[in-house]
Image (cartoon, rainbow, N blue to C red):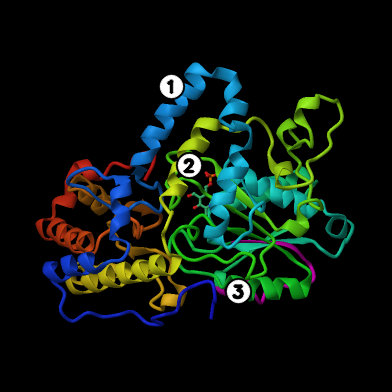
Amino acid sequence: MNPSVSTKTAQPNRDSNLNRESCIARDKADPLAFARARFFLPDNTIYLDGNSLGARPHAALARLDAAIRDDWGKHLIQSWNTADWVNLPQRVGDKIAPLIGASVGEVLVADSTSVNLFKLLAGVLSLPEVANDPSRQIILSERDNFPTDLYIAEGVNKMLGNRYRLKLVSGEELQSALDSSVAALLVTQVDYRTGRVHNMDELNRAAARCGTHVIWDLSHSAGALPVQLNQDGATFAVGCGYKYFNGGPGAPGYLYVHRDWQTRLSTPLSGWFGHAAPFTFVPQYTPAENISRFQCGTPSVLATIALDAGVDTFADISMSHLREKSLALTDLFWQLADTHLSSFGFQCVAPREHVLRGSQLSFAHHNAYAIMQAIIDRGVIGDFRRPNLLRFGFTPLYTRFVDCFDAIMIIRDVMQSGVWQSEKYQHQHAVT
Ligand SMILES: Cc1ncc(COP(=O)(O)O)c(C=O)c1O
């Protein structure tokens, strides 16, 4: 069992008395209900895509307005000092740290998830004990991992003269594929399609027995369920700022490096912001002796301020309440879907067991794309993932139980009316 994940109810709760009133009653009793007021949510919209782009916190507007008007507008370049822009990536990293079970000084906001993964993977593969051991030939990952992780592994390997081989297996096979030939394991804790959760503690232990370094991608787990990096023996991780952390489109990502590894790992992107003393402007690179060494160039200040406002939406939130609500929302949605949608051919592909389930549900359907477009037109926003999935994310900070009920009724209506067959829903947009 994964100790990172609440197992309060090991199996789904099934409520035999499901109607709109009972959902409203659950919202009234919800200890996290207060958090919804922290977000702007448009009228007539049920937003079930916060796992892809978190909703906008009210505070983001005010924070950006002040930063643009006053700090940038009036105080100009002095704001690097007066508004402490220079330490913003570390300060926001320190706010993310307790949400992912890390300590202060172990998390840095920087670049994108992809770039952070590049930095950490290249760093791991350049460690002398890895680079100088000819028997360590494998970079291991999951075939269904999010593609950018696999593309980055390919790119890093190419940069290192194809010294390694990228071995891809199913999620179930990851642990058995670990042996002393594996230099690095790249693993995304929650699968972006099915929502299946990997057991962090177990995989870290198995990897440690083989001397393999693990880099976790927390993009679909951080802010969605309790993550315990330190407790579960994790040394390296990356994650997204724009999903559950509500940092806005293209928000910077973050990286975690356990304190013991910060001075041992070097980044290939040795830019001046990772220098021990950037403003001495010396020609030789000397990396900072802490997490700051994983910065590259000038941080994206406005985007990091928006992310700061996003991370602040977690203030006073109990992660165990968050997890309980997340599971209750997915249980409810799934049960309603079983009742109202299964006759239309919807097949849920998420794990039934709570311990294996993230904060999303995906349903396989032959006509998933067109159906998703039709329900988006009716105000229920999820997304489509190839080959045939309608994906719905449940962000416990602002999703209500009644939203689940109303969404299912709208989807049922779309199916009963056949409106999804309209020509206008068949055309695939660039972003799905
Ligand atoms: C697991 C995972 N990793 C990484 C990314 C994307 O990273 P980036 O912010 O670099 O585009 C995503 C995006 O959805 C993701 O799901």
Span colored in magenta: 172-187
Q: Residue at x 62, y 73 (%)?
A: 201
Residue that carries the numbered disc 2 in the rendered image: 307
What kind of element bears circle 3? helix
Disc 1 crowd rating (10 Å Cα; few below 14, some 14-19, many 20+) is: few
Looking at the picture, how far across and down is residue 415, in whole percent? 16, 59
Nearest the camera: 205 or 176? 205
Give the foreground label among 3 and 1: 1
CB of mark 1 near ligand 1 (< 8 Å):
no
Image quadrant holding the C terminus, namely top left
**Mark number, residue 173:** 3
Residue 2 vs 166, above or below: the answer is below
Looking at the picture, how far across and down is residue 103, in whole percent? 64, 58
Residue that carries the numbered disc 1 in the rendered image: 69
Residue 174 vs 284, above or below: the answer is below
Q: Residue at x 16, y 74 (%)?
A: 18
Choose top left, top right, bottom left or bottom right for residue 428.
top left
Residue 226 shown left or right of residue 266 in the figure: left
Residue 373 vs 225, above or below: the answer is above
- For the residues labelled 3 and 1, the Cα–Cα distance comes to 53 Å
Task: Please report contact status of discs 1 and 2: CB closer than 8 Å, yes or no.
Answer: no
Nearest the camera: 30 or 115? 30
**Mark number, residue 209:** none
Nearest the camera: 33 or 215? 33
Task: Please report contact status of discs 3 and 1: CB closer than 8 Å, yes or no.
Answer: no
Looking at the picture, how far across and down is residue 217, in whole percent? 58, 57
Among the two numbered marks 1 and 2 on one chain, the one whose residue lies closer to the N terminus: 1
Q: Residue at x 61, y 60 (%)?
A: 102
Choose top left, top right, bottom left or bottom right for residue 79.
top right
Give the foreground label among 1 and 2: 1
Among the two numbered marks 2 and 3 on one chain, the one whose residue lies closer to the N terminus: 3
